[in-house]
C-alpha cells in the first residue's frame, strides 16, 4: 500500500503557517458518480509531480509556510449536516489564528461550512463560485446539505448580492427561477467564451464590491475534456487556462480557497494533477499579495 505523504512542500507547523491545507474525504450526497471522497488523496499524490520552484512565479513553494492538517474526521457514515459542521469548526480554528484555509474535497457541500465560518469571523466578503452547476436548489431529495444546494446555502448566509458564480451551464428550471427572483448573479461558460475570463471575473468583482473573496472551485467548471474525473461532468466548460487566469485576477483579494468534486475513480491520469496545480497557484499568487498584510482582521 502506498504511503500517504500529504500535499507536497507543506512543511510548516500550524503555529508558523500562513496557509493551512486540510482534506474532506466525503461524497455521501454525490449523485451521478461516486468517488469524490478519494479526491484529496489523489490530488496530494499528484502534487509531488511538480518542481517546488515555479517557473512562472519565480517562487519556491517550499519557501512559503504551509501546514498540512490532514483529514477531517468524517466518513460517509457522518451526516451531511455534521460534515458541514466539521468543516465549519476547522475553518473557524484556522481563520481565528489569522491563517488562510485551503480545503480539498470531497463533495462540494463542504464549502458551506467554510463560508459559514468566514461569515462569523471576517467583515464584508464575497464568494466566487467556479462551477458548471448553479447549485441553487433549496434541497435535493429532501437534503438541504447537498452538493446541489451549495450556492443557495451561501446566499442565505451572506446575502445573494455577495455570491457570484462563473462557468455555469446547468440548472433545473426551479433553481434558475429562484436565483432570478433572489437576484443571485452568475455568468455562463458561454459568457466567458464571448467576453473572455478576465472581463467576466472583473464584472464579478464589481458586482460583489468587496475586497475580500473566498473562492470555491468546483472542478467540474473545467471542461470534461480536460477534467473528466468529476462527479457530474458537464460539456461546454472552461479551459485550464481560464481557471488559471481566474485565480490570477482574484489572487489579491483571496482570503480562502477550496477545490472540490475531484473524483479520481473516473480519471486518475490528469484531473487530480490539474487540481494540485490550481492549489499551488492559489497559494503562490495570494502569497505574493499577502506579504506583510494581516489576512482576516477587519
Ligand atoms: Mn458542479
Ligand atoms: Mn458544485
Image (cartoon, rainbow, N blue to C red):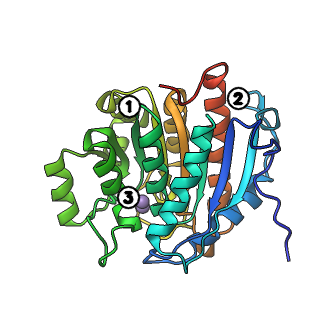
Query: What secondary structure is found at the residue carrying circle 3?
Result: helix
Query: What secondary structure is found at the residue carrying circle 2?
Result: loop
- Inter-mark Cα distance, 2 to 1: 29 Å
Q: Which mark is first along the chain, 1 or 2?
A: 2
- Give the residue number, with chain letter if any, for mark 3: 150
In this rendering, does residue 221 appear at all? no
- In the picture as drawn, the residue positioned furthest to the top comes out as 292
On the image, the x and y values in percent for residue 183 come to 18, 44
Q: Residue 284: name its quadrant.
A: top right
- Inter-mark Cα distance, 3 to 1: 19 Å
On the image, the x and y values in percent for residue 151 come to 34, 54
| Residue 57: numbered disc | 2
In this rendering, does residue 105 appear at all? yes
Q: Please identify, in this view, whether the residue under mark 3 or under mark 2 is nearer the observer.
A: 3
> Residue at 75% across / 43% down in the picture?
14
88 relative position to 171: left or right: right
Nearest the camera: 228 or 122?
122
| Residue 124: numbered disc | 1
On the image, the x and y values in percent for residue 248 come to 55, 32
Q: Please identify, in this view, whether the residue under mark 2 or under mark 1 is nearer the observer.
A: 1
> Residue at 43% across / 77% down in the picture?
31
Q: Is residue 166 above or below residue 153?
A: above
Q: Which mark is first along the chain, 1 or 3?
A: 1
> Does ligand 2 reach within 8 Å of label 3's beta carbon?
yes
Q: Which mark is first along the chain, 2 or 3?
A: 2
Amino acid at each position: 500500500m502506498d504511503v500517504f505523504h500529504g500535499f507536497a512542500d507543506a512543511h510548516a507547523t500550524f503555529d508558523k503557517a500562513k496557509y493551512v491545507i486540510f482534506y474532506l474525504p466525503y461524497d455521501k450526497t454525490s449523485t451521478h458518480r461516486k468517488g469524490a471522497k478519494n479526491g484529496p488523496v489523489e490530488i496530494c499524490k499528484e502534487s509531488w509531480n511538480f518542481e517546488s520552484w515555479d517557473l512562472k512565479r519565480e517562487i519556491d513553494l517550499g519557501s512559503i509556510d504551509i501546514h498540512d492538517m490532514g483529514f477531517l474526521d468524517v466518513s460517509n457514515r457522518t451526516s451531511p449536516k455534521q460534515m458541514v459542521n466539521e468543516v465549519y469548526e476547522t475553518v473557524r480554528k484556522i481563520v481565528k489564528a489569522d491563517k488562510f484555509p485551503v480545503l480539498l474535497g470531497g463533495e462540494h457541500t463542504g464549502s458551506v461550512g467554510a463560508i459559514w465560518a468566514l461569515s462569523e469571523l471576517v467583515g464584508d466578503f464575497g464568494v466566487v463560485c467556479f462551477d458548471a452547476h448553479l447549485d441553487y436548489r433549496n434541497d435535493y431529495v429532501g437534503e438541504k446539505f447537498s452538493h446541489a444546494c451549495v450556492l443557495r446555502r451561501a446566499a442565505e448566509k451572506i446575502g445573494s448580492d455577495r455570491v457570484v458564480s462563473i462557468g455555469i451551464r446547468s440548472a433545473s428550471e426551479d433553481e434558475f427561477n429562484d436565483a432570478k427572483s433572489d437576484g443571485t448573479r452568475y455568468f455562463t461558460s458561454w459568457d466567458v467564451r464571448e467576453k473572455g475570463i478576465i472581463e467576466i471575473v472583473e464584472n464579478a468583482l464589481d458586482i460583489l464590491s468587496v475586497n475580500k473573496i473566498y473562492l470555491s472551485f468546483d472542478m467540474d467548471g473545467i471542461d470534461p475534456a480536460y477534467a473528466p474525473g468529476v462527479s457530474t461532468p458537464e460539456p461546454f466548460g472552461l479551459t485550464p487556462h481560464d481557471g488559471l487566469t481566474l485565480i490570477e485576477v482574484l489572487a489579491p483579494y483571496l482570503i480562502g480557497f477550496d477545490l472540490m468534486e475531484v473524483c479520481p475513480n473516473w480519471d486518475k491520469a490528469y484531473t487530480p494533477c490539474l487540481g494540485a496545480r490550481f492549489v499551488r497557484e492559489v497559494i503562490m499568487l495570494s502569497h505574493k499579495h499577502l506579504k506583510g498584510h494581516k489576512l482576516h482582521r477587519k
